[in-house]
Image (spheres, helix red, strand yellow):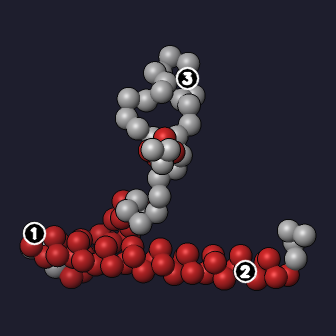
Amino acid sequence: MVGTILFRMILWELCKVFVIALVGITGILLLAGIIAEASQQGLGPTQILAAIPLLIPSTLRTPSPPPPCSPPASSTAAWPPTTRCWRSSRRG
């Protein structure tokens, strides 16, 4: 039942909307924040355009949710962490 055509069509439409929204929000944040700051620092348009691909990964953190917490790989690290996890903050 999972592989029905209707299910795949709905999933495809949801994925398209998610990607368009992610690109749009990231673009707005990138253009508004980074370009304003770079122009205040005295960077030219070519320098700003050259820096945009380097700044996209750090900008993607804002519109996308953080991954859920998982225990550390080594047994010597402290668990649970001292800061609240994304998953534990939703429990209330």
What percent of the width, then of the height, locates residue 67?
Answer: 52, 50
Q: Which residue is mark 3?
A: 74
What kind of residue is marked 1? Gln
What percent of the width, then of the height, locates residue 15?
Answer: 63, 76
Per the model, the C-alpha gap separating discs 2 and 3 is 41 Å
Question: In terms of depth relative to the viewer, which is nearer, 37 or 21?
Answer: 21
Name the front one of labels 2 and 3. 2
Residue 54 appears in view:
no
Local crowd at mark 2 within 10 Å, few (<14), some, or many (≥20)? few
Name the front one of labels 2 and 1. 2
Q: Secondary structure at mark 2?
A: helix
Instruction: Choose top left, top right, bottom left or bottom right for residue 47.
Output: bottom left
Tell whether 44 sits left or right of 17: left
Q: Secondary structure at mark 3?
A: loop
What kind of residue is marked 2? Ile
Q: Which residue is mark 2?
A: 10
Q: Which residue is mark 1?
A: 41
**N-terminal label among 1 and 3:** 1
Given the current orientation, which residue lies at the most extreme top position? 76
Dividing the image into 4 quarters, which one contains the N terminus?
A: bottom right
Dividing the image into 4 quarters, which one contains the C terminus?
A: top left
In the displayed structure, 37 sits above or below 28; it is above
Q: Which residue corresponds to the image point at 47% horizontal and 58% vertical from the top-left? A: 65
